[in-house]
Amino acid sequence: MKKFFEDIKKDIKFKSAGPGKKLTEASSSKAEVVQSSCGSKHNRNAPSEGSQRAGAAALARIEQHPRPKVHTSQDAIRNQGEVQFSRGKGEANRRPIDGYSETPTRQVKRELETAALADKERSNPEEESKVVEKDLSCLSVSGVYFTCPLTGATLTKSEREVHIKEAILMRFEEDAVEASVMMVHTFNKDKEKVKAAVDIMSKYIENICKNPTEEKYRKIKLSNKVYQEKVRCVDGCREFLEALGFTSILLPVEGQEEEEEFLVLLEHGPDALELMKERRDRLQRGEPVRAQLDRQPQAFRSSPHGQRFELPPDFYNLTAEELKREQHQRSESVEKNAMMRTKAMREKEEQRERRKYNYTLLRIRLPDGSLLQGTFYAWDRLTTLFCFVRDSLVDGWRPFELLAPGGQKLTESEEVALAECNLVPAALLTFSWDAAVQADITAAGGSSSAILKPELLETLRTLS
């Protein structure tokens, strides 16, 4: 606060210095101005006693409130630039500049402006989504979609999990054993717990098959510690046991007054025991039911816009807030590229960049100029890409080559992910027939006018 009052005194001294003067004016007038300013200085009156008391009270009030730790100014903001988006807007976080502090008046003004901006954002909650949203007609693909392997339905990312669970539950009417096996492996995310539960239920079945007449092996006490800790906590286990023929029954327990619940299996014949072994094997071989990525194969006419991609947010492993921050940070890439970095540093940064993407959109330019487009996981292997292209060709048996941007030849036999080949989040590849086989076909006088299958040509579109 001492500095604050010193600033005020300096302002008063400056204003009382008199009118300004050009450097080209005569020196005699300079002395006159100095004399005038000195005279005005001697004519100043000291603050009255009331003014001094008011100033002391104001100083006490200000000292009661802690000053903000972050200080800045508009000049500092312009020098530093925006460093982070706040509340989905371009409001920059302001950083302190060494040796500079704001005056209380300026701090209050800035805080009021920030509060007004926050109120405006609260009153317009849909404004953020309007900024991020893109016109679907401008997108290269409308989104990422999946296919349910049980129903064949096309689903979005948010729909797939619920839909698959409902589809599994509906299968109990047709095959309770199959549905319960799906339930065990799909409804539970912890693979270790699933494995432990499967091992224990397999042990139940093995004991029954080895000792078919022993009643104790055909009863499972539900309050048993092993059942409670290993089986009960895994969804679908009880449904599987009931599908095998276990029935819930209350039975007396020695040394207890109240009966307890048991799962009891009636005595089975040899054929029934063999069936139980087959169902145990199905449980052990079970796999989670997962929605399959819909590659959305699409053919396009020859176009100079083949390298132009507009992707929806589904392709990124980032939230909308992170996406906006990522766009802002691109402005810093020039400085990073100018820095001296080792090969290991560059490779590490490239790997970090690739992990931002879940999916990739690939286009393949064919010899006739047309384009084939498909959606892939960023970590799909090159084999998946070659199979997709081969399944889209009329002559899928013919060997072909794919070249990545920059002329890099892709090899189907390599166990390399698309992300590791820098084919994310989108890329345009070049297709060519194997030269030797093509020469043999040409020499024999054979050729195929169409490259893509008819079902793709029926939906041929033009890139805009």
Image: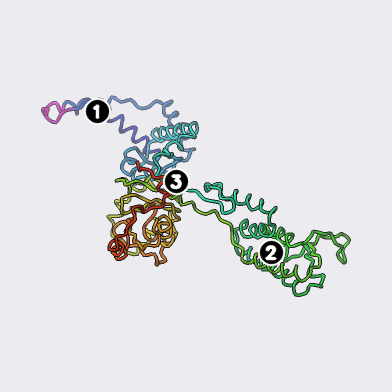
Point out the frontmost of discs 1 and 3. 3
Give the mark nearer the N terminus: 1 vs 3. Answer: 1
Q: Which mark identifies residue 352?
A: none
Q: Nearer the viewer, residue 367 or 279?
A: 367
Q: CA distance from mark 2 to mark 1?
A: 88 Å
Number of numbered discs on residues: 3
Lateral position of residue 290 relative to residue 448, left or right: right
Q: Residue at the spot x=85%, y=62% of the render?
A: 251
Residue 5, image x and y in percent?
37, 34
Give the mark nearer the N terminus: 2 vs 1. Answer: 1
Lateral position of residue 244 relative to residue 328, left or right: right
Magenta stretch bounds: 21-31
Q: Which residue is mark 3?
A: 313
Q: Local crowd at mark 2 within 10 Å, few (<14), some, or many (≥20)? A: some
Rendered image quadrant of residue 440: bottom left
Lateral position of residue 277 relative to residue 422, left or right: right
Rendered image quadrant of residue 349: bottom left
Q: Which residue is mark 2?
A: 230
Q: Which residue is mark 1?
A: 17
Q: Residue at the spot x=33%, y=35% of the render?
A: 7
Q: Residue furthest bottom?
A: 210
Q: Nearer the viewer, residue 74 or 372?
A: 372
Under circle 2, the secondary element is helix
Under circle 1, the secondary element is loop
Measured along the vertical axis of the image, is residue 67 above or below residue 237?
above
